[in-house]
Amino acid sequence: MSHDLVEKGFLPAFDNPLLSKLDDSAIFEAKGRLAFTTDSYIVTPIFFPGGDIGKLAVCGTVNDLAMSGATPLYLSVSFIIEEGFPLSDLKRIVASIQQAAEESGVKVVTGDTKVVNRGSVDKLFINTAGVGVVPDEVDISGSNARVGDRIILSGPIGDHGIAVMSKREGLKFASPVKSDCAPLNKLVAEMLEASSKIHALRDPTRGGLASTLNEFAMQSQVGILIYEDMIPVRDEVRAACEMLGFDPLYVANEGRLVAVVAPDDAERVVESIQHNKYGAEAAIIGEVLQEHPGRVVMRTHLGTSRIVDMLVGELLPRIC
Amino acid sequence: MFEKKKMRFIDEFRDAELAKAVIGRIHRRSRRHVRLMEFCGGHTVAIMKHGLRQLLPETVEMLSGPGCPVCVTANQDLDKAIALARHPGVIITTFGDMLKIPGSRSSLQKVRADGADVRVVYSTIDALQIARENPEKAVVFIGIGFEATAPTVAASIINADEEWISNYYVLSMHKLCPPVIEALLSCGEVKLDGLICPGHVSAIIGSRPWEFAATDYGIACVVSGFEPLDILQSVAMLVDQLERGEPRVDIAYRRGVRPEGNLRAQELMNTVFEFSPATWRGIGTVPDSGLILRKEYERFDAELAFDIEPGQTLEHKGCLCGDILRGVKTPVDCKLFGTSCTPEHPVGPCMVSSEGSCASYYHYETA
Amino acid sequence: MCLAIPALVKSLEGDLAEVEIGGIGRKISTVLTPEVKVGDYVLLHTGYAINVIDEEEAEETLKLFAEMALLEDELEWGTP
């Protein structure tokens, strides 16, 4: 079954010379510092408004590479499939992977499939690993934030988490909330071209914007101040959060990034991505301070201040 | 700044300019030092989330009360829910608030990790649907919440009755607010001048059940909504009452609460439930402060339908949750707060519940 | 219990209502508010309407705030 799957299912989708060789390893050359990352994807439901587990698996790993300033080159894709998982669904997901890979310009050069007994996995798990090259002059890290830097957010928060939740909760939307799942490597490339003073980059996935900002604050030992009124949130996402008792700051995103940029370059970086569909609503949402190192504080709509903590555990709908 | 579509009856009550006006009034009027308790966990969260304490004068002191329904559920009751989850053939349906709350030894989340079928639902409507879809299993809904929630649970039982759904059960841990306020006031431990009364509980029971606090104990009472302007307005009204020395019950949340409440909801609640004594964490047993299913609906009562063996009740050592719930201590008074008790590894419910006092302090308060 | 959100009733069918909050729709129960009409706003708590919102009272309250704002302005700047 596995060999068939690879030959008939995946090869045509990922047609590239390295994969077609069907050797045990893909061999390639790369010059410079290499970035290497891996992640496993277990999202449920598998298909959600705006994407599916396949698209997520590619974008997640491409983005992890992009966030270190790397140009993503090659991916591996491994499937662990529950026995009985519909072949038509698998084909759909493979097509998603192919589309996402094509959009981001990466090649899937190696992979694996395993079919396991019913109940051993929840329908389908995917693991992707990715390799990219980091240009010599790039030094991007969560520990590089400096006092005075500005915080840039590439677009509205909460879309992915709410899109997934909406399927589970049976929420209908006047304008459907789609997951923001997207590959951001080209966006990052444009930003790097606009400025050499991008100090930190991260995509706020699980735990949302709040958790990413806390990570920066702790890694760099700086304080971060953000402004509630400056943070873009779609109306429907806000309404869904109010209804379920969520705070958009903690809801997962899969196609957004947070950048920490030197103050004189901040406006330029925002402008550099506003024409890009993934950066059209980019905004400066805050700054890095010397005060309260390791903590993130938000200036509320009313002008008061409150701490924005890290997310602990999972986001649960509440009634109180 | 991005354009935000207004959410009706929410955004107008978050207006920063209007808030300034109400705050100005509070500062002008407030002379004497007053202690106000917000009973409801939802009020605690709103106050913290919008940083409202920072806007009030020093003469107004805010205390958090025992209005967090999961926080006040005693370990012996939590243990029952957890024990029931371990029964084969049982699907536990619960609000998200309950999932991580620690009982004597475990939590619903932990038993779920061990293989128990525990599902978070947004509504009893979802729980009933799960019952319809799983006729061979017993679906037990964990009934927590005060008078805003109890009528919805009552409605689900009546629904199950009318539809002849025979595999739906409720484990009632519902509690009532006025009796516990009375218990707090009568034991005299907490010095209170005013009470911010829970708005959605009052939407159901009306404002009259709070009158005893004003007439018997001289406490100023204002029924409050949950948006920043609502809460600030309520503080302003309490300050007014106290400056005049005229404690009474006022409704600030006039768009949501009538003095008589929601009679239909009260009727449904009384049809299905009757009063019983209930054990409140940190307070003890309070007569007529809980709800149990009436005899006519006893076939839906999980307590009667199942052999529940919760095991010995253990209390969390050093946890001041009980004192904090009564308003006599604050989270910072607790030796465990921020050290061995944090959201990552909580000891007591006040730290786990999203609206528990300790969690709110930990998450929102500026150091 | 606290989290209840104002929702606009778009249609009614028996004990159920289709409501809208800020662009999202949901089916809820009106069993606790049998008097509700299309076009009303209700307080939505755990999938049930627990009360019909009194829009007039809401307007009154907002007017009260606006008056307070005027008064505070006068006090701050002196009566014109």
Image (spheres, rainbow, N blue to C red):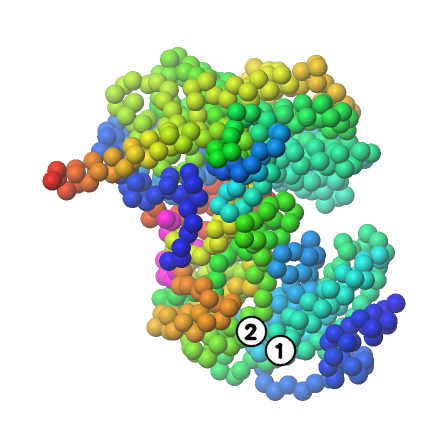
Magenta span includes A291: yes
Quick one: which residue is furthest to the right in this view?
A1
Residue depicted at x 78% and y 72% = A10
User: From where the camera sits, is residue A167 visible?
Assistant: yes
Q: Distance between the residues labelled 2 and 1?
A: 9 Å
Under mark 1, the amino acid is Gly
Please state the horizontal and vertical placement of residue B264, each as a whole percent of the image.
55, 20
* Quarter of the image that includes the N terminus of chain B: bottom left
Q: Which chain carries label 1?
A: A
Under mark 2, the amino acid is Asn
Q: Which mark is residue A185?
A: 2
Q: Give the range drawn in magenta.
A: A286-301
Please state the horizontal and vertical placement of residue A248, each as a whole percent of the image.
50, 51
Residue linked to disc 1: A105
Residue B337 position (above or below residue B236): below
Q: Mark 2 lies on which chain?
A: A
Q: Nearer the viewer, mark 2 or mark 1?
A: 1
Q: Is residue A265 left or right of residue A10?
A: left
Q: How crowded is mark 2: few (under 14 residues within 10 Å), some or many (20 or more)?
A: many
